[in-house]
């Protein structure tokens, strides 16, 4: 909200700089985002128009003689409204003005000496737009000032405007009086409320019009006034200027007054043409289903039964608290006005405006739940101003329908004990009462504490804690001490899933992978570019996605991972090894979707860069598997990799991972991505990936007891022997290792070389296995070693048809 | 004879100097060679000084020859000096090039959001706040209603919402992408009695146009402490400690009044960043309605809550110009942290 200080000064003396004022308001809760000065015009002064003559070469232009305080100058002007005797804003050469013809509203240009249609123009007579005051550029700005020609314009029109960002709990500060009250309290000044009194004349308002509230739940109070014999016209300059200063457009004197009072007091009002209200009878009721009304903006609105309507006995004449109806609008022919100042239910008002997409200055205020005390004050203020700017006679008294009179909460109690307990310190009694009183609360002592009467402009204050905030923010948060947190530290609750996620991420980082974080929502069609594992759940669809690229919640990490691979292959020279640990989603029918954490990673292109000491290497299955092994090693577990199928992964180069130690729980899958999938992603290099479930990894950590991790160091020497075996191609390394490890003297068995092809029989391969033997209680003899080795070899022969390679 | 005699000293000097330079085999020897031949009182200077005694035409020719010699000797000296430095007289024959790149284990890295979240969580963990995590898809009831943000309340404007099912007819209300990590407040309080002290990191989502400073997806860390006797002063103490950890002990911090529906009084903590106050954390004393909503007695218990955005903090700390880098998965960005 714009806060012009020139206007604010009506209600409070400003005794500090705008910067200091902004600081104090901000600290107390009304954040001032910027301080704008409208007075920084150089080379623009007050001028008098001494003569207006036709331009010799152009019909639409005139030659204006301007007295600028020193001399008469001749200016070429295109404005239709320039006239002799006017006081205007004269810009001399060098002035920097808004460029009225640019599309960019902030664009400026420096005024140069120039010839217009053959006549030299010594400067310019300015429009509001050129001065940056408004968008008005139809004519020049006529100044209402007694200031002498030559007076810098800034001294006449200059103002400082604070741009305040208001929080939704403070509708009072959507009126300048509310801001002024804050300023008064924060700077120790007196608040001056605007005058409300006016003289009225018989007959009584109640005899000229009536109000009936059919739905008091949505309208606790409706006040009305009748002003007859008004003269509709443009507002006087002071009013129009202020309407512009607050960022609105002047319309006519009546409408401008209703807007003025809204920006002054925070109460929206509406003026009806009295004579267009049938029987002068106003009915406040819910709309009938399908009922229609044409609002002031010319749109026909279809209403539902929850929308509150202002009607006469025949038709709707306004959408309560949202927008007036076109059929009862004030226009040039209006002579009698029915003025409405009412209190409408906040949530209902908000619902109506959001259903109809009609947010206005009125709804911004009503939706915050105004209290009914405000409506009468605003009604009287507006009536006074209408009489002042549009003449006419106010009917005696006001019409006041107030069914919600007793429903509003009147007082809030606050105990000293509670205040001290919440704040953590003790403010003096005097400070408490003086702060609340200054804010307009009527405070009285009540037991060990206070009772505060809530002023009508503070609907946000309903509980003791609200009063505590009022006291604390005005005294200043800086006055509250800083203490290390008191209270008990709760007993620690095991949350192993968080620890596992950390360990998994750390292990993958150590495996050379970079963590990525993708959006949790994706494009439905794009997601299908990579097949999911069978049994994947239905997508969770968003009702109002931010864009079609993020319209469904992702069901797996695969698509975002391959997207990231593709993007980085284009822009990154080094190896691309990425992983993500993130949530995936599947529809679970009613209620919250199924949501779980997956961990997926990919190696693409080079898994190692060429250097002076190593060869470049393309990523393949074993890079992805190595990362998984590293991850499992971090969890002190060993995985079993079994050939398997996956719709996205190359058959024969894909494995599922299980952990026998953890009851054979399946962790996920590892494999090389199918070429047809890579093609869809425009990836031209092989990609190997893995995808694991965090829950499964968690069950692995639960299965690993600390006692499983450590075994005592054996004092006796171990021995290492290699076997070179010839086996069928289909025999796996895991099978050979498993048989070797069954021997009780074997502590480890590792396949360290594989060879196929030349020199070997068709369908055979050669595997070299390194076997380590050790006994916990003696050094093994050569004889024992040979015996064990023979036994292993025999078992390999019998079970796998393996032979020793000669 | 006299004319050749005047050239002789120069060529003789050349021969002598070249011979002795090639014999110089240490840095010391090279330096004494330089002093002997090229020094201010050296032999070449001596010849140049004597030129004055010659006839003008001879003087010119001899001067040019002497200067040429000077250039030659200087160049030869520089070359010898560089060569001697390179060979490093003591280097063994099988020396390696120590400037070749080392074999560096390939380094991966954590995402910058993860890094900064871990840093923040560590700070809170050490103050007794335990980490808990929640779901990204949440019930309207936990995201809003339980947090004192009823439907049709203007406070909902502060958080434009992406819905999965808005019009669901259920006591839990609609289903949505959580707009904040605050739903963990009621969820945890429903599960346990005071004392409560938790921090909860995670992704949040808002229906918000993206630009260099706005993202529709972002992370947040929620914090909550509830017990008997917790006060605003404790809130300040906790958050000051956090700010010291994350931004350093010299950083200026301020607390100002702000509004969040689930706290009262409400606080915004800003830090001084190059003379500008930047809001980094919203906080406040837990609203009594939030406590009573989960069955805690607000007359007995008080508490404070806070929420901080790790990406916002990272933007400041590293001077990142565009928040959209965070979820772009671009190694050119990620590899820098």
Image (cartoon, coloured by chain):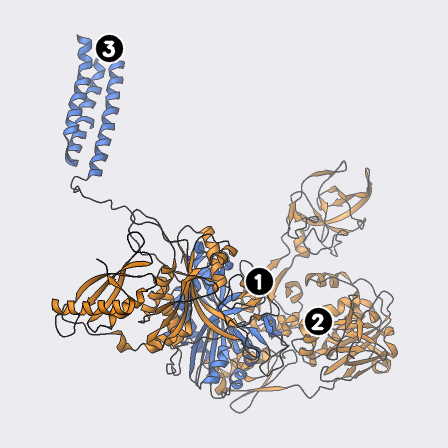
Colour blue maps to chain: B
Q: Secondary structure at mark 1?
A: helix
Q: Chain of mark 1?
A: A
Judge whether residue A150 can be spotted in this image: yes
Give A151 or A59, whichever is nearer the viewer: A59
Q: Quadrant of the N terminus of chain B?
A: top left
User: Mark 2, mark 1: which one is toward the viewer?
Assistant: 1
Residue shown at the point (59%, 72%) measured from the top left? B163
Instruction: Count neighbours of disc 3 (C-alpha within 10 A) and say few if under 14, some if 14 to 19, many if 20 or more.
Output: few
Chain A palette colour = orange
Judge whether residue A95 can be spotted in this image: no
Query: Where is mark 2, residue-wise?
Result: A362
Q: Is residue A336 above or below residue B96?
A: below
Residue A662 locus on image (x, y percent) = 35, 76
User: Mark 3, mark 1: which one is toward the viewer?
Assistant: 1
Query: Where is mark 3, residue-wise?
Result: B55
User: Residues under labels 3 and 2: Cα distance?
Assistant: 108 Å
User: Mark 3, mark 2: which one is toward the viewer?
Assistant: 2
Give A656 or B290, whichever is nearer the viewer: A656
* Disc 3 and disc 1 on one polypeptide chain: no
Residue shown at the point (36%, 60%) measured from the top left? A622
Residue A287 locus on image (x, y percent) = 77, 79
User: Residues under labels 2 and 1: Cα distance?
Assistant: 44 Å
Give B11 or A339, whichever is nearer the viewer: B11
Q: Chain of mark 2?
A: A
Q: Is residue A300 above or below residue A130?
A: below
């Amino acid at each position: 909200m714009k806060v012009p200080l020139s206007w604010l000064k009506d209600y409070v003396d400003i005794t500090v700089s705008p910067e200091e004022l902004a600081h104090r308001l901000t600290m107390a809760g009304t954040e001032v985002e910027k301080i704008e000065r409208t007075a920084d015009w150089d080379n623009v002064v007050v001028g008098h128009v001494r003569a207006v003559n036709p331009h010799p070469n152009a019909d639409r232009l005139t030659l204006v003689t301007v007295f600028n305080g020193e001399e008469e100058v001749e200016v070429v002007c295109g404005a239709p409204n320039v006239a002799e005797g006017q006081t205007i804003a004269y810009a001399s050469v060098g002035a920097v003005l808004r460029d009225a013809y640019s599309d960019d509203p902030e664009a400026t240009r420096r005024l140069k000496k120039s010839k217009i249609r053959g006549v030299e123009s010594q400067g310019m007579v300015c429009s509001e737009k050129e001065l940056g005051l408004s968008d008005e550029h139809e004519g020049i700005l006529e100044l209402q000032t007694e200031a002498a020609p030559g007076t810098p314009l800034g001294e006449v029109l200059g103002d400082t405007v604070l741009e305040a960002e208001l929080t939704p709990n403070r509708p009072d500060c959507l009126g300048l009086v509310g801001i002024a009250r804050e300023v008064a309290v924060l700077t120790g000044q007196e608040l001056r409320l605007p005058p409300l009194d006016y003289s009225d004349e018989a007959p009584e308002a109640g005899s000229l019009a009536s109000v009936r509230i059919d739905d008091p739940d949505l309208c606790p109070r409706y006040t009305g006034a009748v002003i007859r014999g008004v003269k509709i016209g443009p507002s006087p300059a002071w009013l129009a200027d202020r309407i512009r200063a607050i960022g609105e457009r002047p319309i006519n004197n009546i409408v401008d007054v209703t807007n003025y009072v809204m920006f002054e007091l925070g109460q929206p009002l509406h003026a009806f043409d009295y004579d267009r209200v049938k029987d002068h009878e106003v009915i406040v009721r819910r709309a009938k289903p399908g009922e229609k009304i044409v609002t002031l903006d010319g749109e026909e609105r279809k209403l539902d039964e929850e929308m509150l309507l202002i009607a006469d006995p025949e038709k709707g004449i306004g959408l309560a608290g949202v927008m007036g109806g076109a059929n009862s609008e004030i226009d040039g022919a209006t002579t009698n006005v029915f003025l409405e100042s009412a209190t409408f239910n906040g949530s209902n008002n908000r619902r109506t405006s959001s259903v109809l997409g009609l947010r206005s200055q009125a709804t911004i205020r009503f939706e915050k739940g105004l209290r009914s005390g405000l409506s009468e004050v605003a009604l009287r203020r507006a009536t006074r101003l209408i009489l002042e700017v549009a003449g006419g006679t106010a009917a005696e008294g006001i019409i006041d329908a107030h069914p919600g009179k007793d429903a509003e909460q009147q007082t809030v109690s606050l105990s000293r004990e509670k205040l001290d307990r919440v704040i953590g310190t003790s403010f003096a009694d005097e400070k408490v009462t003086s702060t609340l009183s200054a804010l307009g609360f009527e405070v009285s002592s009540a037991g060990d504490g206070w009772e505060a009467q809530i002023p009508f402009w503070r609907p946000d204050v309903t509980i003791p804690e609200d009063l505590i905030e009022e006291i604390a923010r005005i005294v200043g948060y800086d006055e509250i001490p800083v203490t290390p947190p008191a209270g008990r530290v709760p007993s620690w609750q095991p949350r192993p899933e968080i620890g596992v996620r950390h360990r998994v991420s750390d292990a993958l980082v150590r495996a050379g992978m970079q963590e990525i974080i993708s959006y949790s929502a994706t494009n439905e069609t794009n997601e299908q570019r990579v097949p999911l594992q069978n049994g994947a759940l239905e997508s969770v669809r968003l009702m109002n996605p931010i864009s079609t690229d993020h319209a469904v919640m992702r069901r797996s990490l695969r698509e975002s991972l391959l997207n990231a691979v593709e993007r980085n292959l284009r822009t990154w020279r080094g190896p691309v090894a990425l992983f993500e640990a993130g949530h995936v989603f599947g529809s679970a029918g009613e209620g919250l979707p199924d949501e779980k954490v997956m961990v997926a990673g990919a190696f693409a292109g080079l898994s190692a860069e060429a250097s002076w000491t190593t060869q470049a290497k393309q990523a393949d299955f074993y890079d992805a598997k190595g990362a998984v092994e590293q991850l499992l090693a971090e969890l002190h577990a060993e995985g079993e990799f079994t050939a398997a199928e996956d719709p996205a992964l190359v058959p024969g180069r894909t494995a599922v991972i299980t952990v026998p130690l953890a009851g054979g729980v399946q962790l996920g899958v590892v494999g090389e991505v199918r070429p047809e999938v890579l093609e869809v992603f425009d990836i031209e290099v092989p990609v190997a990936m893995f995808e694991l479930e965090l829950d499964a990894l968690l069950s692995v950590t639960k299965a690993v007891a600390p006692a499983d991790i450590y075994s005592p160091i054996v004092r006796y020497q171990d021995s290492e022997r290699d076997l070179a075996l010839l086996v069928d191609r289909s025999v796996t390394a895991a099978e050979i290792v498993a048989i070797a490890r069954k021997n009780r003297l074997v502590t480890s068995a590792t396949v360290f070389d594989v060879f196929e092809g030349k020199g070997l029989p068709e369908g055979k391969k050669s595997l070299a296995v390194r076997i380590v033997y050790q006994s916990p209680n003696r050094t093994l003899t050569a004889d024992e070693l040979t015996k064990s080795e023979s036994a292993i070899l025999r078992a390999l022969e019998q079970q796998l048809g393996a032979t020793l390679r000669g | 004879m006299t004319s050749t005699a005047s050239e002789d000293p120069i060529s003789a000097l050349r021969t002598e100097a070249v011979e002795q330079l090639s014999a110089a085999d240490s840095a010391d020897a090279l330096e004494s060679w330089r002093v002997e031949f090229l020094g201010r009182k050296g032999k070449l200077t001596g010849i140049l000084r004597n030129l004055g005694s010659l006839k003008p035409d001879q003087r010119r020719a001899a001067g040019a020859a002497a200067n040429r010699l000077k250039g030659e000797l200087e160049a030869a000296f520089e070359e010898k000096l560089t060569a001697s430095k390179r060979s490093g007289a003591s280097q063994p024959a099988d020396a390696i090039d120590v400037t070749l790149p080392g074999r560096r284990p390939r380094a991966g890295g954590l995402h910058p959001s993860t890094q900064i979240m871990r840093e923040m969580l560590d700070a809170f963990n050490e103050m007794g706040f335990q980490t808990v995590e929640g779901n990204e898809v949440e019930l309207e009831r936990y995201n809003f209603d339980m947090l004192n943000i009823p439907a049709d309340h203007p406070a909902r404007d502060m958080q434009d919402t992406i819905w999965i099912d808005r019009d669901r007819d259920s006591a839990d209300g609609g289903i949505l992408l959580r707009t904040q990590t605050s739903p963990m407040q009621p969820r945890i309080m429903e599960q346990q009695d005071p004392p409560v002290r938790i921090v909860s990191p995670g992704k949040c989502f808002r229906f918000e146009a993206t630009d260099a400073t706005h993202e529709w997806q972002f992370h947040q860390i929620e914090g909550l402490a509830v017990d008997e006797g917790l006060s605003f002063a404790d809130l300040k103490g906790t958050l000051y400690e956090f700010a010291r950890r994350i931004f350093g002990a010299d950083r200026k911090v301020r607390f100002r009044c702000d509004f969040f529906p689930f706290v009262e009084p409400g606080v915004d903590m800003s830090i001084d960043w190059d003379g500008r106050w930047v809001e980094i954390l919203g906080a406040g004393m837990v609203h009594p309605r939030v406590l009573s909503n989960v069955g805690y007695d607000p007359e007995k218990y008080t508490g404070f809550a806070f929420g901080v955005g790790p990406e916002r903090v990272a933007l400041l700390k590293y001077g990142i110009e565009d928040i959209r880098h965070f979820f772009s998965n671009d190694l050119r960005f990620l590899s820098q942290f």
